[in-house]
Amino acid sequence: MTGGKLATVATMLGAMLWMMPSALAAQDAGMHGHQDAPPPCAAPAALPQGLQGWANAASALTMAGSAQDARAETVTVGTVYDMGLKPTSTLRYAVTPRKLPDQAGFGGLAAFHVARPGRYQVVQDGHAWVDVIGAGKALASAGHGHGLPCSGITKMVAYDLAPGRYVLQVAGNGRATLKVMIVPVG
């Protein structure tokens, strides 16, 4: 190898070694959820079929602090709610949440009714843990995901539900409010 080519290779290797720590830090941040905030949105995202109600004005509802009180706090499928939550330390959950909440967080319970069998999504603007309680137990989720960028939806959890009455149980939210909507899928 000639002296000029050797100098070029050495320069490239030096640049790669110099960039390596920042590339590794970026990968580590992505793996541990420490990513930079997404860029600001120029306009709200167009919502897909079934989620257009998310853009409607939200109804206010204070979630109950116990399963028994949740019977009085009923949400309607397809309606978006700004839910007031209660400090975790004051809650009596219907069943122990599958993910135990931080005692400094917020949560609550509300009942809802399903008229037709099918898959339903619990859509939210936070990072709360949600369980759907039916027949006295937490139901297994059928899937989960994130909303479209710029939609305001951060988390979606799907459940396969038969007709009947259920309790939505929210745990571990980082703030005392949560925008939520339960919608049929498809």
Image: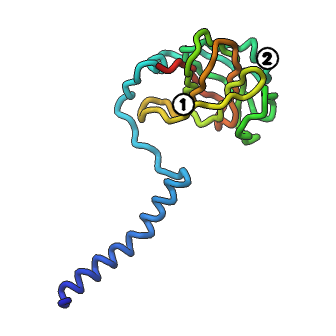
Q: In this view, does 84 lie to the left or right of 72?
A: left
Among numbered discs 2 and 1, the one appearing first in the sequence: 2
For the residue carrying disc 1, how many other residues have a C-alpha within 10 Å: few (<14), some (14-19), or many (20+)?
A: many
> In the drawing, what numbered circle is on residue 156?
1
Q: In this view, does 113 lie to the left or right of 100?
A: left
Q: Where is residue 42 in the image (x, y as percent from the top left)?
A: 34, 33
For the residue carrying disc 2, how many other residues have a C-alpha within 10 Å: few (<14), some (14-19), or many (20+)?
A: some
Residue tagged 2: 69
Q: Which residue is drawn at 36% across and 29% down?
A: 43
Q: Which one is in front in this view, the residue at disc 2 or the one at disc 1?
A: 1
Q: Which amino acid does label 1 sit on?
A: Met
Q: Which residue is drawn at 50% across and 30% down?
A: 153
User: In the displayed structure, would residue 165 be above or below residue 172?
Assistant: above
Q: Where is residue 44 in the image (x, y as percent from the top left)?
A: 39, 28
- Residue 133 occupies which quadrant of the picture? top right
Q: Residue at x 55, y 21 (%)?
A: 119
Q: Residue at x 51, y 35 (%)?
A: 145
Q: Is residue 167 left or right of residue 37?
A: right
Q: Which amino acid does label 2 sit on?
A: Asp
- The alpha-carbon separation of the residues under discs 2 and 1 comes to 25 Å
SS for dot 1:
strand
Of 138 and 80, nearer the camera is 138
User: In the displayed structure, would residue 100 be above or below residue 67?
Assistant: below
Q: Position of residue 34 (x, y in %)?
A: 53, 52
